């Protein structure tokens, strides 16, 4: 790489650009970073889609094609380290994971910002249930090292902050900046959509609770005209276990699958839905670690009512009954009850959507979130300018 004049680096062990919600957050953070340092270096895994990036951001994609998670993670970390070795003017290093962070933290002249959206010692338990406890303990030690050495920590929810404080992280260096969304332009209802439908959109990891949603459709058998549209951010092969479950439950004819949609098309589908559903499960990832579901903010921005699991991470965003309907996590019958309620009482549906939209405009537009991020960065940027 010939250019060694970069003053900031953003590193993430995520594919980018991609259809995942994380890509939206990466867009917004790199936008703020590159405004302060007009020549920013972005390091990521390979892309899932094409996207034109600002001229102020130089993007390098890792060439690693290792299928084993840990080998891929270590190889990515080594690749980032090799890139940083060629850079002698870096002042700010923003990273989203420990694999990106370790090479940055090894260079004490770089002011470090750790954006904690998830921790592998917690999330990998669901993704790889046979991973040994010894391996998870080693990963946790690496997390603790990154948390201790980072000069600033950003996280998207109070739940995550509480978890970090419980791990002896100094509370004063943790800044909570939630996710957000942009208000979309709504056009005519796309052709091919059913008259009445509810929507799930996002990833298909176990903690998302898509199985609970499919089971709820069984309880809504007396509403044969109601369809479930699932807009997966993954490729079709990841949907197969859920499609088999739908067949077993005899609801597959009422489920419409869509994959890796662009934002504009997704927003139209959300906007004409009866509601969207965030059926998060009661697991360590959602309860102990925490999250800030982009699907909730996107729904609020589309003025579409939300039905969500009654979890602390959701109550941080929405008030029950007035701004959303909550159901007991992993209780399909209770989820079905909420769907039935919104179907039968359109006035309630409109009121909830409007209340959530008002809160969204007051607190969760990307414009407001970016201002908060810029303000949080301000002091640490001044240390290096």
Image: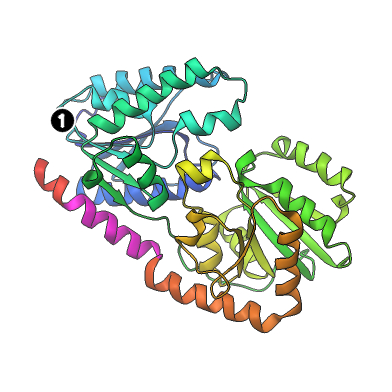
Which sits in the foreground, 298 or 188?
A: 298
Q: Which residues are magenta?
A: 364-378
Q: Secondary structure at mark 1?
A: loop
Residue 157 seen in this snapshot: no
Residue 254 in the image: state x and y as whole percent: 84, 57
Residue at 54% over, 72% down: 323
Examine the image and state in which quarter residue 362 appears: bottom left
Q: Quadrant of the N terminus?
A: top left
For the rendered model, the colour scheme is rainbow
367 within the magenta span? yes
Residue 261 in the image: state x and y as whole percent: 62, 51
Residue at 55% over, 37% down: 48
Examine the image and state in which quarter residue 225 appears: bottom right
Which sits in the foreground, 294 or 128?
A: 128
49 within the magenta span? no
Which sits in the foreground, 296 or 31?
A: 296
Residue 378 seen in this snapshot: yes
Magenta residues, dominant SS class: helix
Q: Report the residue marked by disc 1.
A: 89
Mark 1 closeness class: few <14, some 14–19, many ≥20 residues within 10 Å: some
Q: Quadrant of the C terminus?
A: top left
Residue at 67% over, 39% down: 235
Residue 60 in the image: state x and y as whole percent: 38, 31
Residue 99 falls left or right of residue 252: left
Residue at 47% over, 45% down: 22
Relative to 192, say whether 341 is above or below: below
Residue 38 in the image: state x and y as whole percent: 22, 46
Which sits in the foreground, 239 or 151?
A: 151
Residue 72 falls left or right of residue 262: left
């Amino acid at each position: 790489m010939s250019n060694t004049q970069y003053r900031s680096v953003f590193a993430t062990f995520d594919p980018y650009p991609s259809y995942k919600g994380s890509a939206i957050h990466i867009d917004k953070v790199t936008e703020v970073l590159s405004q302060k340092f007009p020549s920013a270096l972005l390091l990521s895994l390979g892309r899932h889609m094409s996207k034109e990036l600002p001229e102020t951001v130089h993007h390098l994609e890792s060439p690693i094609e290792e299928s084993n998670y840990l080998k891929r993670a270590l190889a990515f970390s080594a690749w980032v380290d090799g890139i940083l070795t060629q850079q002698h003017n870096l002042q700010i290093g923003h990273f989203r994971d420990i694999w990106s962070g370790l090479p940055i933290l090894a260079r004490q002249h770089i002011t470090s910002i750790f954006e904690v959206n998830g921790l592998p010692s917690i999330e990998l338990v669901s993704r790889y249930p046979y991973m040994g406890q010894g391996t998870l303990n080693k990963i946790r030690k690496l997390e603790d090292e990154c948390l201790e050495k980072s000069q600033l920590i950003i996280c998207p929810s109070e739940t995550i902050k509480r978890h970090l404080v419980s791990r002896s992280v100094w509370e004063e260096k943790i800044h909570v900046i939630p996710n957000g969304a942009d208000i979309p332009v709504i056009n005519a209802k796309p052709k091919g959509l059913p008259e009445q439908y509810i929507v799930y959109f996002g990833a298909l990891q176990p903690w998302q609770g898509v199985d609970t949603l499919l089971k709820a459709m069984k309880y809504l058998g007396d509403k044969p005209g109601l369809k479930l549209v699932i807009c997966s951010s993954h490729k079709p092969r990841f949907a197969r276990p859920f499609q088999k479950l739908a067949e077993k439950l005899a609801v597959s004819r009422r489920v419409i699958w869509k994959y890796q949609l662009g934002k504009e098309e997704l927003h139209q589908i959300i906007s004409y839905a009866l509601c969207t559903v965030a059926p998060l499960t009661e697991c360590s990832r959602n309860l102990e670690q925490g999250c800030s579901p982009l699907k909730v903010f996107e729904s609020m921005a589309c003025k579409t009512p939300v039905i969500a699991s009654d979890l602390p991470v959701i109550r941080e965003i929405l008030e029950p009954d007035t701004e959303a309907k909550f159901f007991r996590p992993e209780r399909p019958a209770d989820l079905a009850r909420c769907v039935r309620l919104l179907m039968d009482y359109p006035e309630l549906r409109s009121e909830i959507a409007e209340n959530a939209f008002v809160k969204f405009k007051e607190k969760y537009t990307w414009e407001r979130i970016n201002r908060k991020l810029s303000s949080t960065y301000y002091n640490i940027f001044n240390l290096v300018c």
